[in-house]
Image (cartoon, rainbow, N blue to C red):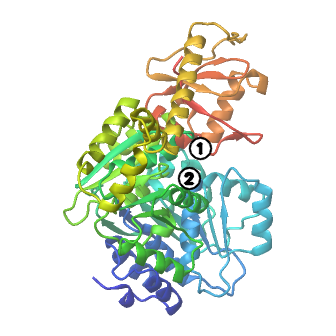
Amino acid sequence: MRSFEEIGLIPSLARVVKERGFTQPSDIQSGTIPILLEKATDFIGLAQTGTGKTAAFGLPLLQKLDLKGKYTQGIILSPTRELAIQTFKELSLFGKYLNGLKMENVYGGTPVHKQAKRIQRNAPHIIVGTPGRVIDLLKRKSIILDKVRFFILDEADEMLNMGFEQEIKKILEFASDGANTWLFSATMPKSIRGIVKKYMNDPVEVAVNTENKVNQNIKHMYSFVNRENKFDKLTYIIDKAQDLYGVIFCRMKSETEQLAKDLNRHGYNAEAINGDLSQGKREQVIKRFRSKNTNILVASDVAARGLDIKNLTHVIHYALPDTFEYYTHRSGRTGRAGEDGISIAFIGKKDVGKLKRMEKALKINFEEYKIDLKPPTAQEKVEEWIQRNGDHKEGGNPLIIDALKARLDEWSKEELIHVIANTQLAPTEKEKRFAKLERSSDRSSHKEQRNDSGKKRKKEKVKPKKAKKKHNPNFTDIFINIGYSDGFGDVALEDFISKNTGISKSKIGAFEINKRYSLFGLDKGLANQLDFLFKDVDLKGRRIIAKVDEG
């Protein structure tokens, strides 16, 4: 296997690779990069999660650009906004020494007209985006594809699972005869083979690590959290672990900085690492972490790329990553070289379906990490204090003991007990927070009980419409937060769902349209993909939520 120094990268790219600590390419990188650098060919790269596919297509793409040309030469399609952002950041890091390189990132959830103006003003060489937003910009004629030389489909199977097949086909129809399509995927279902057959010309195929495996020595766990108790549950895990030495992953760089500050403020030794750090500061942070002067590293996914730290005991996902690849990449940093490791994911109830899909896809099993944030009882505090101090009933500095005897003769036993209670056993800041959380939980539980009994709750008047389709036992009832007050009837809502998610109308069942919400049937095979299907769907800026109806 050739090293990165031997793989044929131009100096400006080789410099970044070296700075980031990459020495030996992964299997998919060593199998892909030389081919894409040497040939003008269509290409299929099959590799499982966490194998470094972004560098596999990103480095050759950057090297093949005509930086003097003021037009778009490469389109990269990603299944989700988060992955599009991560890919954009990764390529920006690789291309930081390429003078004149221009790139744009496009995705839903932000005003399309602003993205259109940036593209028209900057004439980017590369556009990284989600299929739906790229289609929107094509319709506006903000993206011009007639000179694009490289169409890259990243996580192709995920894009098809999310219903983007038609968008991908429309985009590939713009490919000129001289353009190359590079397709990267973990699996190769029939739908992808159909795209290959129709839109690709005699592609070279490289398949590595096709069995989706995660380090076998990792114990995978999850814990339910909410906004109020998330930080305290994190510190609970740190306190319970013996000699924790680990990485906490956050989605955003601002979160890494804030979380590291909060941890330090509460007495923990943590540092943040993200894409804003200069190379010098990054190396200093990593050096302190490697030497264990710091035992907690709070990192973003991009900043952690290329980070190789041995003997990590824990990886904690402060929020679930958006792709299976990122989960494998994160958790795989522990449990190496025969050592045991623990990966703990913080989730909300809306993440349960995603966790189950992750179990199935990665062939792993998640166990619940139960965390009890109740403050200790008075008896528990006293017992713990006695056990901690029981061995100190003898010995000590004679001068101090004599001075204490002289003064404590003036105190009664009762007074001494009060002093201990008010100093040694006074509630800690953490115990105060735990007590507050417990009271808040009790209030929520009481409120739910009142609601369940029908008291203090007004029943919303609804106007159910006649269902257009008969109920199908193979369908699951889905709740969606739009109704006839938004102007929807059966036909309009069916059109809205199908258009925005790519779900075929044949997979959508009976409707019940209410004032502010509706219910509809959905093929059971799609019910566990709601998070993906509705991820970027909005109505006039309002996020659309769809979930399995629980009554």
Mark 2 falls on what kind of element? loop
Kindly identify which residue carries mark 2: 80
Residue 424 seen in render: yes
Q: Which residue is rendered at x = 26% and y = 51% of the image?
A: 392
- Residue extending farthest to the top is 454
Q: Amino acid at mark 2?
A: Thr
Residue 294 occupies quadrant: bottom left
Q: Which mark is residue 136?
A: none
- Residue at which label 1 appears: 535
Q: CA distance from mark 1 to mark 2?
A: 8 Å
Quadrant placement of the C terminus: top right
Q: Secondary structure at mark 1?
A: loop
The amino acid type found where label 1 is placed reads: Lys
The image quarter in which residue 453 lies: top right
Of residues 38 and 447, which is closer to you in this image? 447
Q: Residue at x 58, y 57 (%)?
A: 255
Q: Is residue 177 left or right of residue 215?
A: right
Residue 144 location (% of width, % of height): 72, 67
